[in-house]
Amino acid sequence: MKGQRGLLRLGDHLIGVACRRIPAKTREDRYREWTAELPAILDDPDIRFAFRRSVRMLRYSAGIAWRFSLPSRQQTRRLAGAGYVLITFGLFGWSVWTAVLNPHSWESDLAVTLGVTNCLLLTIGWRVRRRWQRRAR
């Protein structure tokens, strides 16, 4: 099949990305096992068209990469914290922008109040969380 080497390299790369997240004890075995499936899928005589075989092989390797690329609990918490910080600073920026555009309106007063309140709550939340973390140690 034309382009089989490139497809195998792409599938190998996707599986390699997935194997980085596996514990070192089983990493090499899983890598060999999963990459051994790639040529078998590409040379499967039961699938008539080469395009379908290549799509099935890429779907197999992408599925493995997707399964092992899901974030852990700790990474999920970090992402949630980063999202909250972005929302907070976005809200604060929106409140400042609204106050600059409409200096004497109720919308600007509400925006500034929401922005400052959200920043204060973020600061208080960080301090409380740090205290909990220090007590847990």
Image: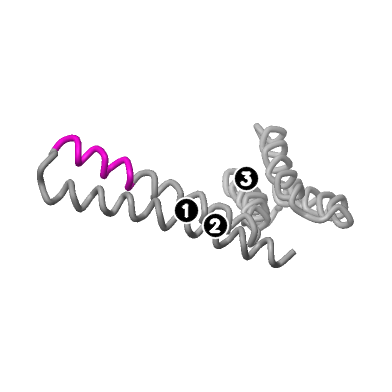
Pointer 2 residue: 127
- Mark 1 or 3: in front is 1
Examine the structure image and report whether residue 92 is included in the region drawn in magenta: yes
Residue 103's disc is none
Pointer 1 residue: 123
Label located before the other in sequence (1 or 3): 3
Q: Report if residue 133 is visible in the image.
A: yes
**Do residues under tags 1 and 2 come within 8 Å of each other at their CB atoms?**
yes
Q: Residue 4: where, in percent of width, then height?
A: 69, 36
92 lies above or below 26: above
Left or right of 56? Residue 98 is: left
Q: Report if residue 48 is visible in the image.
A: no
Which of 62 and 95 lies nearest the eye of the viewer? 95
Pointer 3 residue: 54
How far apart, in angstroms, are the residues tagged by discs 3 and 2? 53 Å
Which of 31 and 3 lies nearest the eye of the viewer? 31
Magenta part of the protein: which range?
91-101
How far apart, in angstroms, are the residues tagged by discs 1 and 3? 52 Å
* Main secondary structure of the magenta stretch: helix
Q: Residue 105: where, in percent of width, then height?
A: 10, 46
Label located before the other in sequence (3 or 2): 3
> Which image quadrant: the C terminus?
bottom right
- Mark 3 or 2: in front is 2
